[in-house]
Image: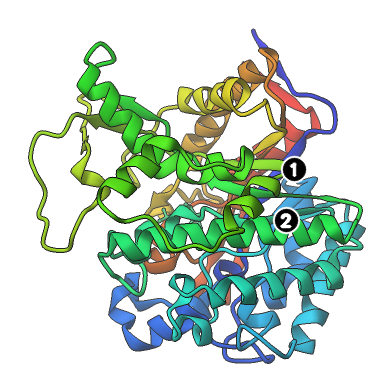
Protein backbone atom coordinates (compact mmCIF):
# COMPACT_ATOMS: atom_id res chain seq x y z
CA UNK A 1 0.00 0.00 0.00
CA UNK A 2 1.27 3.45 -0.93
CA UNK A 3 0.27 6.52 1.02
CA UNK A 4 -0.29 9.79 -0.85
CA UNK A 5 -0.18 12.55 1.70
CA UNK A 6 -0.33 16.21 0.69
CA UNK A 7 1.33 19.28 2.24
CA UNK A 8 -0.29 21.00 5.20
CA UNK A 9 -2.94 23.59 4.38
CA UNK A 10 -3.36 22.22 0.88
CA UNK A 11 -6.24 23.92 -0.96
CA UNK A 12 -8.88 21.30 -1.62
CA UNK A 13 -12.00 22.23 -3.47
CA UNK A 14 -13.49 22.89 -6.85
CA UNK A 15 -14.03 25.56 -9.44
CA UNK A 16 -16.96 27.01 -11.30
CA UNK A 17 -17.91 30.34 -12.83
CA UNK A 18 -20.62 32.94 -12.43
CA UNK A 19 -22.18 32.60 -15.88
CA UNK A 20 -22.30 28.81 -15.61
CA UNK A 21 -23.89 28.63 -12.18
CA UNK A 22 -25.80 31.74 -11.13
CA UNK A 23 -28.84 31.82 -13.39
CA UNK A 24 -31.33 34.67 -12.92
CA UNK A 25 -31.35 36.64 -16.12
CA UNK A 26 -33.13 38.85 -16.81
CA UNK A 27 -33.54 39.96 -13.23
CA UNK A 28 -31.96 41.64 -10.24
CA UNK A 29 -30.36 44.25 -12.46
CA UNK A 30 -28.10 41.92 -14.41
CA UNK A 31 -27.12 43.21 -17.84
CA UNK A 32 -26.86 41.20 -21.03
CA UNK A 33 -23.70 39.17 -21.60
CA UNK A 34 -22.54 37.68 -24.87
CA UNK A 35 -24.15 34.39 -23.80
CA UNK A 36 -27.54 35.90 -23.00
CA UNK A 37 -27.52 37.62 -26.36
CA UNK A 38 -26.33 34.64 -28.37
CA UNK A 39 -28.74 32.20 -26.76
CA UNK A 40 -31.66 34.46 -27.55
CA UNK A 41 -30.47 34.93 -31.13
CA UNK A 42 -29.59 31.29 -31.90
CA UNK A 43 -30.96 28.85 -29.28
CA UNK A 44 -30.41 25.95 -31.67
CA UNK A 45 -26.66 26.32 -31.19
CA UNK A 46 -27.07 25.11 -27.58
CA UNK A 47 -27.43 21.46 -26.55
CA UNK A 48 -31.14 20.70 -26.10
CA UNK A 49 -31.65 24.45 -26.52
CA UNK A 50 -30.83 25.04 -22.86
CA UNK A 51 -29.43 28.49 -22.22
CA UNK A 52 -27.57 30.43 -19.51
CA UNK A 53 -30.84 31.36 -17.78
CA UNK A 54 -30.94 27.66 -16.76
CA UNK A 55 -27.57 27.80 -15.01
CA UNK A 56 -27.60 25.88 -11.74
CA UNK A 57 -29.36 28.59 -9.65
CA UNK A 58 -26.52 29.35 -7.29
CA UNK A 59 -27.79 32.93 -7.18
CA UNK A 60 -30.77 31.65 -5.20
CA UNK A 61 -29.38 28.49 -3.65
CA UNK A 62 -25.93 29.56 -2.47
CA UNK A 63 -26.56 28.97 1.28
CA UNK A 64 -27.53 25.36 0.55
CA UNK A 65 -24.68 25.00 -1.94
CA UNK A 66 -22.07 26.18 0.54
CA UNK A 67 -23.27 23.53 3.00
CA UNK A 68 -22.85 21.00 0.21
CA UNK A 69 -19.32 22.25 -0.39
CA UNK A 70 -18.59 21.58 3.27
CA UNK A 71 -20.17 18.16 3.01
CA UNK A 72 -17.89 17.35 0.09
CA UNK A 73 -14.69 18.41 1.84
CA UNK A 74 -13.98 21.83 0.38
CA UNK A 75 -11.73 24.31 2.15
CA UNK A 76 -11.73 26.62 -0.89
CA UNK A 77 -13.84 27.29 -3.94
CA UNK A 78 -13.36 29.33 -7.08
CA UNK A 79 -16.05 31.12 -8.97
CA UNK A 80 -16.17 34.32 -11.01
CA UNK A 81 -17.82 37.66 -10.64
CA UNK A 82 -20.07 38.19 -13.63
CA UNK A 83 -19.05 41.47 -15.18
CA UNK A 84 -22.52 41.94 -16.67
CA UNK A 85 -24.13 41.43 -13.27
CA UNK A 86 -21.89 43.90 -11.46
CA UNK A 87 -21.63 46.51 -14.22
CA UNK A 88 -24.59 45.77 -16.49
CA UNK A 89 -23.38 47.84 -19.45
CA UNK A 90 -19.76 46.87 -19.14
CA UNK A 91 -18.82 50.43 -18.13
CA UNK A 92 -20.47 52.89 -15.79
CA UNK A 93 -22.98 52.28 -13.03
CA UNK A 94 -22.60 49.43 -10.55
CA UNK A 95 -25.66 47.26 -9.89
CA UNK A 96 -26.36 47.38 -6.11
CA UNK A 97 -28.16 44.02 -6.15
CA UNK A 98 -25.04 42.40 -7.52
CA UNK A 99 -22.96 43.93 -4.74
CA UNK A 100 -25.35 42.46 -2.18
CA UNK A 101 -25.25 39.06 -3.85
CA UNK A 102 -21.46 38.82 -4.08
CA UNK A 103 -21.05 40.17 -0.53
CA UNK A 104 -23.44 37.52 0.77
CA UNK A 105 -21.78 34.77 -1.23
CA UNK A 106 -18.29 35.71 -0.06
CA UNK A 107 -19.32 36.18 3.59
CA UNK A 108 -21.22 32.91 3.67
CA UNK A 109 -18.25 31.03 2.25
CA UNK A 110 -15.86 32.53 4.78
CA UNK A 111 -18.26 31.88 7.67
CA UNK A 112 -18.25 28.22 6.64
CA UNK A 113 -14.49 27.87 6.40
CA UNK A 114 -14.34 27.96 2.61
CA UNK A 115 -11.84 30.38 1.18
CA UNK A 116 -13.21 32.31 -1.81
CA UNK A 117 -11.00 32.38 -4.90
CA UNK A 118 -12.42 35.00 -7.24
CA UNK A 119 -11.88 35.13 -10.94
CA UNK A 120 -12.74 38.22 -12.96
CA UNK A 121 -13.38 36.86 -16.41
CA UNK A 122 -14.74 33.55 -17.62
CA UNK A 123 -15.68 34.10 -21.30
CA UNK A 124 -18.53 36.43 -20.32
CA UNK A 125 -18.07 39.84 -21.90
CA UNK A 126 -20.97 42.27 -21.44
CA UNK A 127 -22.83 42.47 -24.73
CA UNK A 128 -22.63 46.27 -24.79
CA UNK A 129 -18.84 45.88 -25.20
CA UNK A 130 -19.09 43.00 -27.65
CA UNK A 131 -21.27 45.20 -29.87
CA UNK A 132 -18.29 47.53 -30.15
CA UNK A 133 -15.89 44.76 -31.15
CA UNK A 134 -15.33 43.07 -27.79
CA UNK A 135 -11.71 42.16 -27.04
CA UNK A 136 -10.67 43.16 -30.55
CA UNK A 137 -11.32 46.76 -29.48
CA UNK A 138 -8.76 48.27 -27.11
CA UNK A 139 -11.56 50.07 -25.25
CA UNK A 140 -12.45 46.71 -23.69
CA UNK A 141 -9.06 46.70 -21.92
CA UNK A 142 -9.87 49.98 -20.16
CA UNK A 143 -13.40 48.85 -19.33
CA UNK A 144 -12.04 45.59 -17.89
CA UNK A 145 -9.47 47.36 -15.72
CA UNK A 146 -12.19 49.65 -14.32
CA UNK A 147 -14.31 46.56 -13.59
CA UNK A 148 -11.36 44.83 -11.91
CA UNK A 149 -10.66 47.84 -9.70
CA UNK A 150 -14.32 48.00 -8.69
CA UNK A 151 -14.14 44.34 -7.64
CA UNK A 152 -10.94 44.88 -5.62
CA UNK A 153 -12.49 47.91 -3.88
CA UNK A 154 -15.76 46.17 -3.08
CA UNK A 155 -14.54 42.71 -2.12
CA UNK A 156 -10.74 42.92 -1.70
CA UNK A 157 -10.95 43.24 2.07
CA UNK A 158 -12.15 39.61 2.27
CA UNK A 159 -11.11 37.96 -0.99
CA UNK A 160 -7.38 37.18 -0.82
CA UNK A 161 -7.00 35.20 -4.04
CA UNK A 162 -7.83 36.92 -7.31
CA UNK A 163 -7.49 35.77 -10.90
CA UNK A 164 -7.57 38.01 -13.94
CA UNK A 165 -8.82 35.45 -16.47
CA UNK A 166 -9.84 31.84 -16.80
CA UNK A 167 -8.43 30.20 -19.93
CA UNK A 168 -7.82 33.35 -21.98
CA UNK A 169 -7.00 31.16 -24.99
CA UNK A 170 -10.65 30.08 -25.18
CA UNK A 171 -12.15 33.40 -26.32
CA UNK A 172 -9.31 33.50 -28.88
CA UNK A 173 -9.77 30.05 -30.35
CA UNK A 174 -13.50 29.61 -29.77
CA UNK A 175 -14.55 33.08 -30.89
CA UNK A 176 -12.01 33.86 -33.60
CA UNK A 177 -10.53 30.62 -34.98
CA UNK A 178 -12.70 27.54 -34.64
CA UNK A 179 -16.22 28.91 -34.41
CA UNK A 180 -17.56 27.37 -31.24
CA UNK A 181 -18.34 30.62 -29.43
CA UNK A 182 -19.87 33.86 -30.66
CA UNK A 183 -18.87 35.81 -32.78
CA UNK A 184 -17.79 32.62 -34.60
CA UNK A 185 -15.17 34.24 -36.77
CA UNK A 186 -12.25 32.60 -38.53
CA UNK A 187 -9.78 35.43 -38.38
CA UNK A 188 -6.24 35.02 -37.10
CA UNK A 189 -5.68 38.78 -37.06
CA UNK A 190 -8.57 39.27 -34.66
CA UNK A 191 -7.56 36.18 -32.69
CA UNK A 192 -4.08 37.59 -32.09
CA UNK A 193 -5.46 40.99 -31.15
CA UNK A 194 -7.91 39.46 -28.67
CA UNK A 195 -5.15 37.43 -27.02
CA UNK A 196 -2.88 40.46 -26.79
CA UNK A 197 -5.60 42.63 -25.29
CA UNK A 198 -6.46 39.96 -22.74
CA UNK A 199 -2.80 39.84 -21.67
CA UNK A 200 -2.56 43.62 -21.51
CA UNK A 201 -5.77 43.77 -19.46
CA UNK A 202 -4.41 41.11 -17.13
CA UNK A 203 -1.14 43.02 -16.58
CA UNK A 204 -2.99 46.28 -15.97
CA UNK A 205 -5.32 44.64 -13.45
CA UNK A 206 -2.31 43.11 -11.67
CA UNK A 207 -0.67 46.54 -11.60
CA UNK A 208 -3.82 48.12 -10.14
CA UNK A 209 -4.17 45.36 -7.55
CA UNK A 210 -0.59 45.70 -6.35
CA UNK A 211 -0.90 49.48 -6.19
CA UNK A 212 -3.90 49.13 -3.89
CA UNK A 213 -1.69 47.22 -1.41
CA UNK A 214 -4.46 44.90 -0.33
CA UNK A 215 -3.64 41.86 1.72
CA UNK A 216 -3.81 39.13 -0.91
CA UNK A 217 -2.45 37.90 -4.20
CA UNK A 218 -3.41 37.83 -7.84
CA UNK A 219 -2.84 35.28 -10.56
CA UNK A 220 -4.23 33.90 -13.77
CA UNK A 221 -5.80 30.57 -14.65
CA UNK A 222 -4.49 28.89 -17.79
CA UNK A 223 -5.54 25.68 -19.46
CA UNK A 224 -2.30 23.98 -20.36
CA UNK A 225 -2.27 21.22 -22.94
CA UNK A 226 1.17 19.60 -23.09
CA UNK A 227 2.08 19.19 -26.71
CA UNK A 228 3.59 15.78 -27.45
CA UNK A 229 5.25 15.02 -30.80
CA UNK A 230 4.19 11.85 -32.61
CA UNK A 231 7.82 10.76 -32.67
CA UNK A 232 10.24 12.37 -30.24
CA UNK A 233 13.17 11.26 -32.46
CA UNK A 234 11.76 12.99 -35.55
CA UNK A 235 12.90 16.65 -35.66
CA UNK A 236 9.98 17.70 -37.89
CA UNK A 237 7.44 16.32 -35.40
CA UNK A 238 9.32 17.90 -32.49
CA UNK A 239 9.37 21.28 -34.23
CA UNK A 240 5.65 21.07 -35.05
CA UNK A 241 4.85 20.22 -31.42
CA UNK A 242 6.94 23.17 -30.23
CA UNK A 243 4.98 25.53 -32.51
CA UNK A 244 1.65 24.18 -31.23
CA UNK A 245 2.98 24.70 -27.70
CA UNK A 246 3.90 28.31 -28.51
CA UNK A 247 0.46 29.01 -29.99
CA UNK A 248 -1.68 27.36 -27.33
CA UNK A 249 0.33 27.36 -24.10
CA UNK A 250 3.27 29.74 -24.13
CA UNK A 251 1.26 32.56 -25.77
CA UNK A 252 -0.29 33.13 -22.33
CA UNK A 253 2.05 31.31 -19.95
CA UNK A 254 5.16 33.29 -20.95
CA UNK A 255 3.69 36.79 -20.69
CA UNK A 256 1.79 35.92 -17.49
CA UNK A 257 4.76 34.48 -15.62
CA UNK A 258 7.84 35.89 -17.39
CA UNK A 259 6.44 39.07 -18.89
CA UNK A 260 7.57 38.18 -22.43
CA UNK A 261 6.04 36.57 -25.52
CA UNK A 262 7.64 33.44 -27.02
CA UNK A 263 10.14 34.42 -29.72
CA UNK A 264 9.09 31.56 -32.04
CA UNK A 265 5.52 32.83 -32.04
CA UNK A 266 6.50 36.45 -32.56
CA UNK A 267 8.71 35.38 -35.49
CA UNK A 268 5.86 33.49 -37.15
CA UNK A 269 3.39 36.33 -36.69
CA UNK A 270 5.93 38.83 -38.00
CA UNK A 271 6.60 36.69 -41.06
CA UNK A 272 2.92 36.53 -41.98
CA UNK A 273 2.34 40.15 -40.99
CA UNK A 274 -0.08 39.29 -38.17
CA UNK A 275 1.51 40.94 -35.15
CA UNK A 276 -1.10 42.71 -33.00
CA UNK A 277 -1.45 46.46 -32.83
CA UNK A 278 -0.06 47.86 -29.60
CA UNK A 279 1.07 51.08 -28.01
CA UNK A 280 4.57 52.06 -26.96
CA UNK A 281 4.25 51.21 -23.24
CA UNK A 282 2.25 47.99 -23.57
CA UNK A 283 5.19 45.59 -23.62
CA UNK A 284 6.70 47.31 -20.59
CA UNK A 285 3.38 47.04 -18.72
CA UNK A 286 3.24 43.31 -19.50
CA UNK A 287 6.90 42.82 -18.56
CA UNK A 288 6.54 44.57 -15.22
CA UNK A 289 3.26 43.07 -14.02
CA UNK A 290 3.50 39.32 -13.87
CA UNK A 291 1.37 37.04 -11.71
CA UNK A 292 1.86 36.16 -8.03
CA UNK A 293 0.54 32.66 -8.55
CA UNK A 294 -0.59 30.41 -11.37
CA UNK A 295 -3.74 28.34 -11.69
CA UNK A 296 -3.40 25.36 -14.03
CA UNK A 297 -6.38 23.72 -15.70
CA UNK A 298 -5.57 20.34 -17.14
CA UNK A 299 -7.91 18.07 -19.04
CA UNK A 300 -6.02 16.50 -21.93
CA UNK A 301 -2.81 16.73 -23.92
CA UNK A 302 -2.29 17.67 -27.55
CA UNK A 303 -0.70 15.11 -29.89
CA UNK A 304 1.11 16.67 -32.81
CA UNK A 305 2.85 15.61 -36.01
CA UNK A 306 4.64 17.53 -38.73
CA UNK A 307 2.41 19.18 -41.31
CA UNK A 308 1.43 16.69 -43.99
CA UNK A 309 -1.59 18.12 -45.74
CA UNK A 310 -2.13 21.83 -46.35
CA UNK A 311 -5.32 23.32 -44.91
CA UNK A 312 -7.95 25.41 -46.64
CA UNK A 313 -6.57 28.93 -46.78
CA UNK A 314 -9.79 30.77 -47.72
CA UNK A 315 -9.91 32.54 -44.38
CA UNK A 316 -6.24 33.42 -44.19
CA UNK A 317 -3.49 31.88 -42.07
CA UNK A 318 -4.27 29.51 -39.18
CA UNK A 319 -2.12 27.90 -36.47
CA UNK A 320 -2.74 24.57 -38.26
CA UNK A 321 -0.61 25.78 -41.16
CA UNK A 322 2.31 24.74 -38.96
CA UNK A 323 1.35 21.34 -37.56
CA UNK A 324 -1.16 18.52 -37.80
CA UNK A 325 -3.09 17.06 -34.92
CA UNK A 326 -2.26 13.42 -34.46
CA UNK A 327 -4.73 10.73 -33.44
CA UNK A 328 -2.36 8.55 -31.50
CA UNK A 329 -3.44 4.92 -31.76
CA UNK A 330 -4.22 3.24 -28.45
CA UNK A 331 -4.54 6.40 -26.40
CA UNK A 332 -6.81 6.11 -23.39
CA UNK A 333 -10.08 7.93 -23.91
CA UNK A 334 -12.88 9.21 -21.73
CA UNK A 335 -15.51 7.44 -23.80
CA UNK A 336 -18.27 9.59 -22.29
CA UNK A 337 -16.78 12.88 -23.50
CA UNK A 338 -14.35 11.98 -26.24
CA UNK A 339 -11.29 13.55 -24.61
CA UNK A 340 -8.03 11.71 -24.07
CA UNK A 341 -7.11 10.81 -20.50
CA UNK A 342 -3.38 11.07 -19.92
CA UNK A 343 -2.67 11.44 -16.22
CA UNK A 344 1.06 11.96 -16.57
CA UNK A 345 0.35 15.19 -18.47
CA UNK A 346 -0.33 16.92 -15.16
CA UNK A 347 3.12 15.91 -13.92
CA UNK A 348 4.77 17.09 -17.14
CA UNK A 349 3.12 20.51 -16.81
CA UNK A 350 4.20 20.87 -13.19
CA UNK A 351 7.74 19.81 -14.06
CA UNK A 352 7.84 22.35 -16.90
CA UNK A 353 6.61 25.10 -14.57
CA UNK A 354 9.23 24.13 -12.00
CA UNK A 355 12.09 23.97 -14.48
CA UNK A 356 11.24 26.78 -16.88
CA UNK A 357 8.99 29.21 -15.01
CA UNK A 358 10.92 29.83 -11.81
CA UNK A 359 8.90 27.22 -9.91
CA UNK A 360 6.19 29.83 -9.39
CA UNK A 361 3.61 29.02 -6.72
CA UNK A 362 0.81 27.21 -8.49
CA UNK A 363 -2.20 24.98 -7.99
CA UNK A 364 -4.37 22.75 -10.11
CA UNK A 365 -7.33 25.02 -10.71
CA UNK A 366 -9.37 22.61 -12.87
CA UNK A 367 -9.17 18.93 -13.65
CA UNK A 368 -12.15 16.74 -14.19
CA UNK A 369 -14.08 14.22 -16.13
CA UNK A 370 -17.16 15.10 -18.14
CA UNK A 371 -19.71 12.36 -18.64
CA UNK A 372 -22.63 12.43 -21.03
CA UNK A 373 -25.69 10.49 -19.88
CA UNK A 374 -24.55 10.16 -16.30
CA UNK A 375 -28.11 9.29 -15.17
CA UNK A 376 -27.38 5.73 -16.23
CA UNK A 377 -25.14 5.37 -13.17
CA UNK A 378 -27.82 6.27 -10.62
CA UNK A 379 -28.30 3.56 -7.98
CA UNK A 380 -31.50 2.66 -6.11
CA UNK A 381 -30.76 5.27 -3.46
CA UNK A 382 -30.74 7.95 -6.16
CA UNK A 383 -26.98 8.53 -5.96
CA UNK A 384 -24.71 8.56 -8.99
CA UNK A 385 -22.01 5.94 -8.62
CA UNK A 386 -19.21 7.68 -10.44
CA UNK A 387 -16.30 5.37 -9.68
CA UNK A 388 -14.71 6.46 -12.97
CA UNK A 389 -14.44 10.00 -11.54
CA UNK A 390 -12.85 8.79 -8.32
CA UNK A 391 -10.31 6.89 -10.37
CA UNK A 392 -9.73 9.90 -12.63
CA UNK A 393 -9.03 12.21 -9.69
CA UNK A 394 -6.86 9.82 -7.73
CA UNK A 395 -4.75 8.85 -10.76
CA UNK A 396 -4.09 12.54 -11.45
CA UNK A 397 -3.41 13.25 -7.80
CA UNK A 398 -0.70 10.58 -7.71
CA UNK A 399 1.20 12.55 -10.34
CA UNK A 400 0.61 15.83 -8.51
CA UNK A 401 1.99 14.15 -5.43
CA UNK A 402 5.07 12.99 -7.33
CA UNK A 403 5.70 16.51 -8.69
CA UNK A 404 5.48 17.94 -5.17
CA UNK A 405 7.91 15.29 -3.91
CA UNK A 406 10.33 16.44 -6.62
CA UNK A 407 10.06 20.05 -5.51
CA UNK A 408 7.12 21.57 -7.45
CA UNK A 409 5.51 24.45 -5.62
CA UNK A 410 1.93 23.16 -5.74
CA UNK A 411 -0.51 24.59 -3.21
CA UNK A 412 -3.77 22.88 -4.03
CA UNK A 413 -6.13 20.93 -6.21
CA UNK A 414 -9.51 22.11 -7.44
CA UNK A 415 -11.76 19.81 -9.37
CA UNK A 416 -14.07 20.96 -12.13
CA UNK A 417 -16.70 21.18 -10.71
CA UNK A 418 -18.83 21.27 -7.56
CA UNK A 419 -22.42 21.18 -8.84
CA UNK A 420 -23.11 19.97 -12.41
CA UNK A 421 -23.30 23.20 -14.33
CA UNK A 422 -24.23 24.82 -17.59
CA UNK A 423 -21.32 24.57 -19.99
CA UNK A 424 -21.73 27.09 -22.80
CA UNK A 425 -23.02 25.51 -26.02
CA UNK A 426 -22.73 22.06 -24.43
CA UNK A 427 -25.20 23.20 -21.75
CA UNK A 428 -25.74 20.20 -19.43
CA UNK A 429 -24.49 17.60 -21.89
CA UNK A 430 -21.30 16.66 -20.06
CA UNK A 431 -21.66 16.43 -16.28
CA UNK A 432 -18.58 17.13 -14.19
CA UNK A 433 -19.80 17.73 -10.63
CA UNK A 434 -19.36 16.10 -7.25
CA UNK A 435 -23.03 16.91 -6.90
CA UNK A 436 -25.77 16.24 -9.45
CA UNK A 437 -28.37 18.82 -10.38
CA UNK A 438 -31.84 17.70 -11.41
CA UNK A 439 -33.18 20.22 -13.89
CA UNK A 440 -36.65 18.67 -13.76
CA UNK A 441 -36.84 19.24 -10.01
CA UNK A 442 -35.86 22.89 -9.75
CA UNK A 443 -32.20 22.07 -9.67
CA UNK A 444 -32.40 19.58 -6.79
CA UNK A 445 -28.90 18.59 -5.62
CA UNK A 446 -27.64 15.10 -4.71
CA UNK A 447 -24.08 14.33 -3.70
CA UNK A 448 -22.48 11.74 -5.95
CA UNK A 449 -20.25 8.92 -4.72
CA UNK A 450 -17.20 10.99 -5.73
CA UNK A 451 -18.36 13.84 -3.47
CA UNK A 452 -18.44 11.54 -0.44
CA UNK A 453 -15.07 10.12 -1.45
CA UNK A 454 -13.58 13.61 -1.82
CA UNK A 455 -14.74 14.52 1.69
CA UNK A 456 -13.04 11.47 3.20
CA UNK A 457 -9.92 12.03 1.15
CA UNK A 458 -9.56 15.72 2.01
CA UNK A 459 -10.28 15.10 5.72
CA UNK A 460 -7.31 12.73 5.64
CA UNK A 461 -5.34 15.18 3.44
CA UNK A 462 -4.59 12.33 1.07
CA UNK A 463 -5.35 8.70 0.33
CA UNK A 464 -3.90 5.22 0.28
CA UNK A 465 -3.66 3.00 -2.73
C1 LIG B 1 -13.22 24.11 -19.24
C2 LIG B 1 -13.86 25.44 -18.89
C3 LIG B 1 -15.12 25.27 -18.12
C4 LIG B 1 -15.97 24.06 -18.49
C5 LIG B 1 -15.17 22.81 -18.88
C6 LIG B 1 -16.04 21.68 -19.46
O1 LIG B 1 -12.27 24.28 -20.24
O2 LIG B 1 -13.03 26.27 -18.10
O3 LIG B 1 -15.83 26.50 -18.17
O4 LIG B 1 -16.94 24.40 -19.38
O5 LIG B 1 -14.12 23.14 -19.74
O6 LIG B 1 -16.28 21.73 -20.81
P1 LIG B 1 -17.37 20.84 -21.59
O7 LIG B 1 -18.67 21.02 -20.92
O8 LIG B 1 -17.37 21.34 -22.99
O9 LIG B 1 -16.95 19.41 -21.53
Name the residue furthest front.
Answer: 280
Q: Quadrant of the C terminus?
A: top right
Q: Is residue 357 above or below residue 449?
A: above
Q: Quadrant of the N terminus?
A: top right
Residue 220 falls left or right of residue 148: left
- Mark 2 or mark 1: name the one nearer the start of the chain: 2
Res. 206 mark: 2
Depth check, front residue: 391 or 376: 391
Q: Where is residue 222? Give x, y as percent.
A: 55, 46
Residue drawn 90% across and 56% down?
Answer: 213
Q: Residue drawn 52% across and 81% down?
A: 33
Q: Judging from the image, what secondary structure is the residue with disc 1 in?
A: loop
Relative to the observer, which residue lies in front, 295 or 211? 211
For label 2, the crowd category at 10 Å Cα-Cα, with few meaning under 14, some 14 to 19 and many 20 or more, is many
**Relative to residue 387, is residue 399 depicted above or below?**
above
Would you identify the image quadrant in which residue 37 lies?
A: bottom left
Disc 1 residue crowd, few under 14, some 14–19, many 20+, Cα 10 Å: many
The residue at which mark 1 appears reads as 292
How far across and how far down the image is residue 408, in percent?
Answer: 67, 22
Task: Out of 328 and 314, give the one closest to the viewer.
Answer: 314
Mark 2 touching mark 1, by CB under 8 A? yes
Q: Position of residue 432 (x, y in %)?
A: 50, 51
Q: Residue at x 86, y 63 (%)?
A: 156
Query: Which residue is at a point 82% across and 52% down the rendered structure image?
Result: 114
Would you say residue 42 is visible in this rendering? Answer: yes
At mark 2, the secondary structure is helix
> Up-down: is 107 above or below 376?
below
Left or right: residue 437 compared with residue 213 = left
Q: Is mark 1 within 8 Å of ligand 1?
A: no
Res. 48 mark: none
Colour scheme in use = rainbow
Amino acid sequence: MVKYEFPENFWWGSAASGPQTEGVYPGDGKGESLWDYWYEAEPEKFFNQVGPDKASRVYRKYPEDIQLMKATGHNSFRTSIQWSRLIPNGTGAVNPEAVTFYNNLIDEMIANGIEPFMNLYHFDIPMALQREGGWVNRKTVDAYVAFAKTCFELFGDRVKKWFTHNEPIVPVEAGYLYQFHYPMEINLRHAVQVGFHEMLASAKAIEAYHEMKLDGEIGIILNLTPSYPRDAANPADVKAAAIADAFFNRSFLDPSVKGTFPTELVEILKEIDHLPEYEADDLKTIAENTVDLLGINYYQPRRIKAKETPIDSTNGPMPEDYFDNYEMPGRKMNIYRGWEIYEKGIYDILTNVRENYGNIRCFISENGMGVEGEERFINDAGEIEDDYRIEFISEHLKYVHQAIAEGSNVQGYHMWTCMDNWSWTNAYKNRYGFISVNLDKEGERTIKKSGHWFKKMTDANGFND
